Image: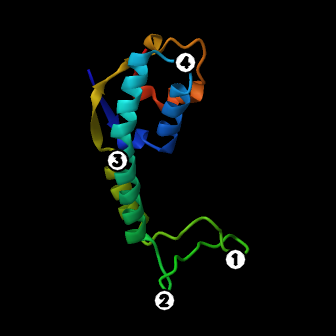
């Protein structure tokens, strides 16, 4: 069965979690499947990231110099690491549309037991839930 994964399930933690599992002593067939998954996920993640940036750029409020306008807290201080969105409803709709896209990976799901691991971090399994048969 091929793997269908939504954009909303893909993030940099997905690749990190695969790499964490590959660093363990997994079976050769599982390592091969994981490598194929990384090769398919990497361009998907790059494309998703580029589109997120384009959507953000499109909806971000900018000043006369083309710089992002930062929102202010109750005391009038700029909130670093944030931006002001011109139309939150349109921004949210476009982001939801992007996140709802299904991607079909050309690899079969991996049976967790086939990995042959005695232990694995729970967060890695959660990040990769789409990849495994339980």
Residue position for label 3: 43
Query: Splitting the image into 4 quarters, where does residue 71 fall?
Result: bottom right
Which residue is outermost to the right? Answer: 75
Q: Residues within 10 Å of mark 1 (few under 14, many from 20)?
A: few
Q: Of the two numbered discs 1 and 3 on the same chain, state the one appearing first in sequence.
A: 3
- Residue placed most toward the observer, 6 or 87: 6
Decide: is 89 above or below 68.
Answer: above
Q: Residues within 10 Å of mark 3 (few under 14, many from 20)?
A: few
Give how far apart the Cα atoms at labels 1 and 3 are. Answer: 41 Å
Q: Of the two numbered discs 2 and 4 on the same chain, state the one appearing first in sequence.
A: 4
Q: Of the two numbered discs 2 and 3 on the same chain, state the one appearing first in sequence.
A: 3
Q: Of the two numbered discs 1 and 2 on the same chain, state the one appearing first in sequence.
A: 2
Q: Is label 1 in a helix, a strand or a loop?
A: loop
Q: Nearer the viewer, mark 1 or mark 3?
A: 3
Q: Nearer the viewer, mark 2 or mark 3?
A: 3
Q: Residues within 10 Å of mark 4 (few under 14, many from 20)?
A: few
Judge left or right: residue 101 versus residue 14: left
Give how far apart the Cα atoms at labels 4 and 3 are. Answer: 26 Å
Q: Of the two numbered discs 4 and 3 on the same chain, state the one appearing first in sequence.
A: 4
Q: Nearer the viewer, mark 2 or mark 4?
A: 4
Q: Nearer the viewer, mark 1 or mark 2?
A: 2
The numbered disc on residue 25 is 4
* Percent of width and height locating residue 129: 45, 26
């Amino acid at each position: 069965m091929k793997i269908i994964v939504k954009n909303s399930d893909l993030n940099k933690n997905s690749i990190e979690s695969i790499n964490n599992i590959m660093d363990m002593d997994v079976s050769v067939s599982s390592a091969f499947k994981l490598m194929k998954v990384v090769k398919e996920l990497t361009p998907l993640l790059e494309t998703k990231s580029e589109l997120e940036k384009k959507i953000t750029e499109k909806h971000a409020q900018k000043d006369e110099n083309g710089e992002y306008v930062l929102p202010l807290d109750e005391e009038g201080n700029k909130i670093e690491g944030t931006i002001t969105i011109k139309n939150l409803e349109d921004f949210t709709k476009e982001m939801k549309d992007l996140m709802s896209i299904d991607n079909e990976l050309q690899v079969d799901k991996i049976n967790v037991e086939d990995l042959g691991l005695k232990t694995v971090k729970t967060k890695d399994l959660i990040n990769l839930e789409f990849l495994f048969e339980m």
